Amino acid sequence: MPITTLVDLSGGARILHYFAGSAGTTLLLASSAGYGFIAKAGDMVSRIKGGKAYITLDEGDLPLAPKVISESASALACISENARLLVFGLDEMKALVNGGRGVTLMELDDKEKLLAVQPISQKGVLVAGIGRGAKQQEARLTASSLALHFGKRARKGKALEAKLKPATLTAIV
C-alpha cells in the first residue's frame, strides 16, 4: 500500500523518513540542528489524515531518521559533519509526549550540522564514511575506544582518530 494513501501531503511536502511499529516502541527523534528527544511511537499517532506537527524544526533544519531505542542501549552516539563524536548516557535525554524541539544533543559550530545520532550499547558503534582517495571506510569503535568520546550532553565532542568524512553511525550488536 503506498504511504500517500495513509497521509495527506500539502503542496510541496515530501516524506523524508517514516516508522512503522507498535505504539509502545521507544524512538529517538533528532534534527540536523543538534536537538532531539525520546518519544513513544503511539504519541505521534493522529486521527486526522493530514497528521500533526510533532517535531519543531527551524528554517533549513532537517529531521534525522528516527531510531529505535533497544533495551540494551545505554548511551547515545552523536556525530557532526566535522567528524566530531560525542557519546553520553541515555539518562540525560528528555522524553516528550507532545513533541517539540527537545534538548541540545551536541553543541555545533556555526553552519555545522549533526549527521547522525545512534542509541548504542556497551558493544560500541561503527562509523562509516569517505576516507582518503574517496574510498568507503569504516571505523569500529568499541567501548574502550569510545572512552575518549564520552562526555556530557550538549558538549562539542572530540574529533575521530580515523581520517574520514562521516556519513552514518551503526550500533554494534
Image (cartoon, helix red, strand yellow):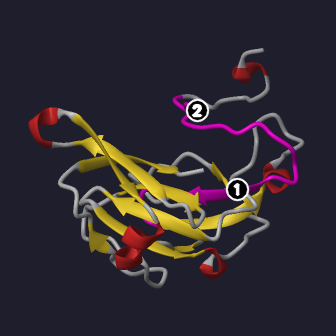
Please tell me whether residue 20 is drawn above or below residue 173 in the rendered image: above
Residue at coordinates 63% horizontally, 32% vertically from top-left?
10
Q: Is residue 31 left or right of residue 101?
A: left
Q: To which residue does mark 1 refer?
A: 27
Please tell me whether residue 91 is drawn above or below residue 78 in the rendered image: below
Q: Is residue 140 left or right of residue 38?
A: left
Q: To which residue does mark 2 refer?
A: 15
How packed mark 2 is, by other alpha carbons closer than 10 Å (few <14, some 14-19, many 20 or more), is few
Q: Position of residue 126 (x, y in %)?
A: 43, 51
Give SS at disc 2.
loop
Q: Is residue 171 left or right of residue 139?
A: right
Please tell me whether residue 38 is drawn above or below residue 162 in the rendered image: below
Please tell me whether residue 60 is drawn above or below residue 104 in the rendered image: above
How packed mark 1 is, by other alpha carbons closer than 10 Å (few <14, some 14-19, many 20 or more), is some
Point out the residue furthest to the top here: 1
Residue 124 is covered by the magenta coloring: no
Residue at coordinates 72% horizontally, 72% vertically from top-left?
95
